[in-house]
Amino acid sequence: MKPFILLFPLVGGTFAASLNAYYKPGNGQRVLNGPSDEIILNGQTFDASPAAMNGFSLDLAEKRLIQMEGKDPIWMTELEKIEAKANGIRFFDITDNPTLDGFASVQGTPTYPTPRAYEQVTSVIKTLTTDGPRKLLEKFTSYWTRYYRSETGAESQKWLLSQIEEITAEAAHPQLRGLISIDEFPHSWGQNTIIARINGSSLTDDRIVIIAAHLDSTNMWPFSPAPGADDDGSGTVTILESYRALLAAGFKPKRPVEFHWYSAEEGGLLGSQAVAKSYAARELKVYAMSQYDMTAWVKAGVREEIGVITDYVNPTLTEVNKQLIDAYLDVPYVETECGYACSDHASWAKAGYPSIFTIESAFKHANLANIHSARDRIDISEEFSFDHMLEFSKLAVAFAIELAGWDKL
Ligand SMILES: *[C@@H]1O[C@H](CO)[C@@H](O)[C@H](O)[C@H]1NC(C)=O
């Protein structure tokens, strides 16, 4: 059977992505009307048999409210969301949080110091390793998928939680341990966001410094394998290594420091929107939020660089981040753009909090050929670099110390 071309019926020409698929959207969980239980997305054929959907709780016919750049939100099915993503369209799924915009305006505009904690930062940076991240990532990428609506997605999140707890128990100084909380931020879809917090010592400044990555992964067809080594296993273990090193060094921040591992980034920034909305509703102040999504790839023949995203970010905080890269990393930065709703920092920006994003390279040199596929593996190429990831761990350490301050234990 030949694929037929289908235009988005709901979008009414606002974006007329042409698709070829063996199904009609919106007619229930069994969406196929072809003979072969296959689906074609963006030229690739996937197994869409009922057996392939075992272990998932994703209703392809469920209607979701989708916010794309510069347009009024529209309703589409989960299946149409998958198609839109496969066609390179970025969006917030705002079904659960339609009113995030401007929520955090209570807090005013922070100012930031220039880098000055040189001795403290360099002393911690020296203790960062590639062994820990490699070991963690080998296991983390061994799940079939970390899709947020899958059983293995929930299992992989619980495993990550156990690792964070173990690392905390092993690395944290006893006096520091009492300041640390590790919590799950629950989500209705079963895979939770994880938040590790080190309380600050200041009695007057409780503005939070957030360092974040996303723990979920996806294939273009969510039921297919998604090891998610670079996207975003790399960011996940990059910031966990920073967390470990900071604890081991007895880092007692003046401001609270939180490490966030979001669920459901790949579903339209669902986890981070829920957390940002909760913080805004509780009138929590966020001093600075920095996202790490894809930190491993150094494209062959291209100079090793840190991609500093300059669109949809806080420009002042981005300048601080560049100064940190200059002061503490062994590779230079390159300015680059990622587009609307590109990763979880966008949820914090949407709520009115200062947030930034740093990525493995100039966007055009990133690992775009392998992510969202079964090829997003550690061993796919020498271009997957744990040494490059280490540079991002340095950046997260510097960000935590410079922006949160360091008090005596
Ligand atoms: C951290 O501070 C918060 C807010 O002051 C408090 O509710 C919480 O119990 C503290 N956590 C720990 C582990 O001390």
Image: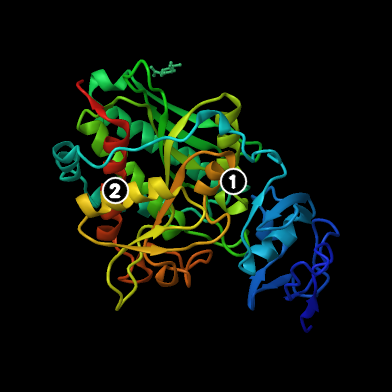
Residue at the far bottom in the pictured view: 2
Camera-nearest residue between 308 and 94? 308
Residue wearing tag 2: 395
Q: Position of residue 117 (x, y in %)?
A: 19, 37
| Colour pattern of the rendering | rainbow
Along the line of sight, which residue is nearer the eye, 128 or 138? 128
Furthest-top residue in this view: 203
Three-letter amino acid code at the position of disc 2: Leu
Q: Identify which residue is drawn at 34% across, 23% down.
A: 200
Q: Which element carries disc 1, helix, strand or loop?
A: helix
Residue 236 visible in the shown view: no
Real-space Cα separation, disc 2 to disc 1, in angstroms = 33 Å
Quarter occupied by residue 230: bottom left
Left or right of 344? Residue 188 is: right
Q: Quadrant of the N terminus?
A: bottom right
Q: Quadrant of ligand 1?
A: top left
**Rendered-image quadrant of the C terminus:** top left
On screen, 327 above or below 154? Answer: below
Disc nearer the start of the sequence (2/1)? 1
Characterize the local packing of mark 2: few (<14), some (14-19) or many (20 or more) Cα atoms within 10 angstroms: many
- Residue 67: image location, x then y, percent: 69, 53
Q: Which residue is mark 1?
A: 151
Q: In x, y percent, where is residue 19?
A: 73, 75
Q: Is mark 1 within 8 Å of ligand 1?
A: no
Residue 222 visible? The answer is yes
